[in-house]
């Protein structure tokens, strides 16, 4: 079974955490019975809306045993697709967009398939070039992830809620580490120049002035701009590499 990039899993875990946080009970004492009743009614309505949205999101999933695509004879299953889909759905919700509309559903399907195909091609290329991941690498990355949670039990609960067992999660971690090794070596971004940083800052400053927002000094956000430019360049280079790999690949989309 095709394993996916860990970035998709962290996205899914983030969505689960947000959902859990949204269901936390208020610790504030109500002023009177009317306030308590109003608060309870509001919570019930929010819970109802959350359940209705979750139902609509799950309707976009496919049979977990269904082959959704084949990339050079490697199958991508519905179970992989559903995990990637849930992550992208969550990202869309965090941006204030509705992932359940007809237009969004088609966009989500295409984006999910494109993402999985691209990841598969890159990992296949990494395997061809003999990139390896040690158990020590996996354990180190796992320890960093667990630091984001208060306890081991909380991490395990969130993982269980995401529908991923520890063995699969560690395998996905291995893929993520391997892919990072490949990208760092084979698709380097290169140095971001001061001219590029200045150009992006000028654009940001112009937008800020047009909307009446206060614009921070360049030195205060220089590192953020540099990071943003690096991510942008890396995404562009990865997209180019995927397109190159597609030229010599056999890809069969089945949904």
Image (cartoon, rainbow, N blue to C red):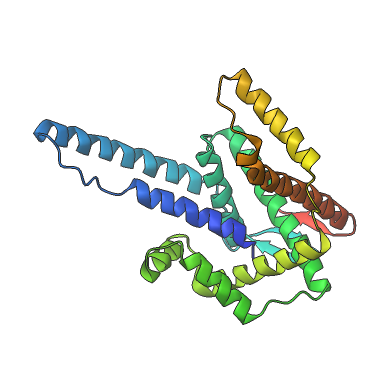
Query: Does residue 73 show up?
Result: no
Tell me if 215 is positioned left or right of 130 in this view.
left
Residue 37 location, quadrant: top left
Please name the residue shown 42% across and 53% down the image: 17
User: Along the line of sight, which residue is nearer the eye, 158 or 26?
Assistant: 26
Q: Quadrant of residue 9?
A: bottom right
Q: Position of residue 38 (x, y in %)?
A: 19, 32
Decide which of 201, 96 is in the foreground and name it.
201
Q: Is residue 7 visible?
A: yes
Q: Name the one closer to the observer, 23 or 27.
A: 27
Q: Count the numbered circles shown.
A: 0
Q: Relative to 200, say whether 158 is above or below.
A: below
Q: Residue at x 81, y 58 (%)?
A: 187
**Image coords of residue 202 (percent x, y):** 71, 29
Residue found at the very far bottom of the displayed protein: 135
Relative image position of residue 101 (x, y in whole percent): 55, 34
In this picture, residue 34 sits left or right of residue 166: left
> Hey, which residue is sitting farthest right in the picture?
248
Left or right side of 149 for 42: left
Q: Position of residue 209 (x, y in %)?
A: 62, 21
Q: Nearer the viewer, residue 243 or 173?
A: 173
Q: Residue at x 58, y 47 (%)?
A: 88
Quadrant showing the N terminus: bottom right
* In this picture, residue 231 sits left or right of residue 141: right
């Amino acid at each position: 079974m095709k394993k996916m990039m860990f970035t998709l899993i962290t996205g899914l875990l983030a969505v689960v955490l947000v959902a859990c946080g949204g269901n936390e009970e208020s610790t504030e004492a109500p002023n009177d019975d009317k306030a308590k009743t109003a608060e309870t009614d509001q919570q019930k309505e929010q819970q109802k809306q959350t359940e209705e949205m979750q139902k609509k999101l799950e309707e976009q999933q496919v049979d977990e045993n269904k082959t959704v695509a084949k990339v050079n004879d490697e199958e991508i299953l519905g179970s992989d697709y559903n995990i990637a889909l849930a992550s992208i759905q969550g990202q869309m919700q965090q941006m204030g967009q509705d992932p359940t509309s007809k237009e969004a559903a088609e966009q989500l399907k295409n984006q999910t398939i494109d993402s999985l195909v691209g990841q598969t091609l890159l990992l296949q290329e990494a395997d061809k070039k003999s990139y390896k991941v040690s158990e020590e690498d996996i354990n180190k990355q796992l320890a960093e992830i667990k630091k984001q949670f208060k306890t081991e039990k909380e991490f395990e609960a969130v993982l269980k809620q995401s529908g991923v067992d520890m063995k699969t999660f560690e395998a996905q971690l291995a893929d993520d580490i391997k892919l990072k090794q490949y990208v760092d070596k084979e698709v380097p971004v290169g140095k971001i120049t001061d001219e590029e940083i200045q150009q992006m800052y000028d654009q940001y400053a112009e937008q800020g002035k047009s909307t009446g927002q206060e614009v921070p000094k360049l030195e205060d956000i220089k590192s953020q701009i540099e990071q943003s430019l690096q991510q942008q360049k890396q995404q562009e280079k990865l997209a180019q590499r995927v397109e190159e790999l597609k030229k010599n690949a056999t890809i069969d989309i089945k949904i």
